[in-house]
């Protein structure tokens, strides 16, 4: 990945405003930069577009349900890797580790 020129950052920001449904990964591939760079442009924290403000409202964290906790425990017991559970469910790695370590409100007994 290379450093993003200022004009590309402005064009990327404009693309986000023009087509809000375009996934950030597609924009990252289009401009040849990392997902993090595009996420920073979307949130308004990239230095090249700081004066323009955020292009998108970033996703808010959702609390997990008891069923999500049960699913994580079940998948782990069946031998799934933690990284696969994270990718498939979209639940954060820290939350998954806290559940498995017994440090979560839905699971107070460590299982590993």
Image: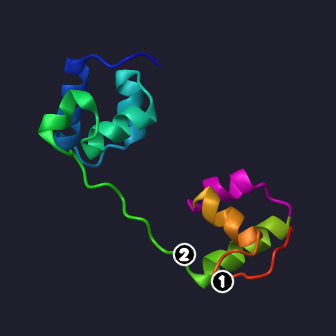
Residue drawn at (19%, 32%) of the image: 49
Residue drawn at (40%, 21%) of the image: 32
Please state which of residues 76 and 36 is positioned toward the viewer in this rendering.
36
Q: Is residue 66 left or right of residue 8?
A: right
Residue tagged 2: 64
Q: Is residue 71 left or right of residue 6?
A: right
How far across and how far down the image is residue 8, in percent? 25, 21
Q: Residues within 10 Å of mark 2 (few under 14, many from 20)?
A: few
- Residue 83 lies in magenta, yes or no? yes
Residues at circles 2 and 1 in contact by the CB criterion of under 8 Å? yes
How far across and how far down the image is residue 35, in percent? 44, 35
Q: Which residues are magenta?
A: 79-91
Instruction: Give the numbered dot on residue 3.
Output: none
Which secondary structure, mark 2?
loop
Picture layout, residue 41 above or below residue 111: above
Q: Quadrant of residue 24?
A: top left
Q: Earlier in the sequence, mark 2 or mark 1?
A: 2
Q: Main SS of the magenta segment?
A: helix
Q: Quadrant of residue 14?
A: top left
Residue tagged 1: 106
Please state which of residues 2 and 17 is positioned toward the viewer in this rendering.
2
Please state which of residues 107 and 85 is positioned toward the viewer in this rendering.
107
- Indicate the colouring scheme: rainbow
Quadrant of the image for the C terminus? Answer: bottom right
Give the foreground label among 2 and 1.
1
Marks 2 and 1 sit apart, C-alpha to C-alpha, by 9 Å
Picture layout, residue 15 above or below residue 106: above
Figure disc tally: 2
Q: Quadrant of residue 92?
A: bottom right
Residue placed furthest toward the left: 52
């Amino acid at each position: 990945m290379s450093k993003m020129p200022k004009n590309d950052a402005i064009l990327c920001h404009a693309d986000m405003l023009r087509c809000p449904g375009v996934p950030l990964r597609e924009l990252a591939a289009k401009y040849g930069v990392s997902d993090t760079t595009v996420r920073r442009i979307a949130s308004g924290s990239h230095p090249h577009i700081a004066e323009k403000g955020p292009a998108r409202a970033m996703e808010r964290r959702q609390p997990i349900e008891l069923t999500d906790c049960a699913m994580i425990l079940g998948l782990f017991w069946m031998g799934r890797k933690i990284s696969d559970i994270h990718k498939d469910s979209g639940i954060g790695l820290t939350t998954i580790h806290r559940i498995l370590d017994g440090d979560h409100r839905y699971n107070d007994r460590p299982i590993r």
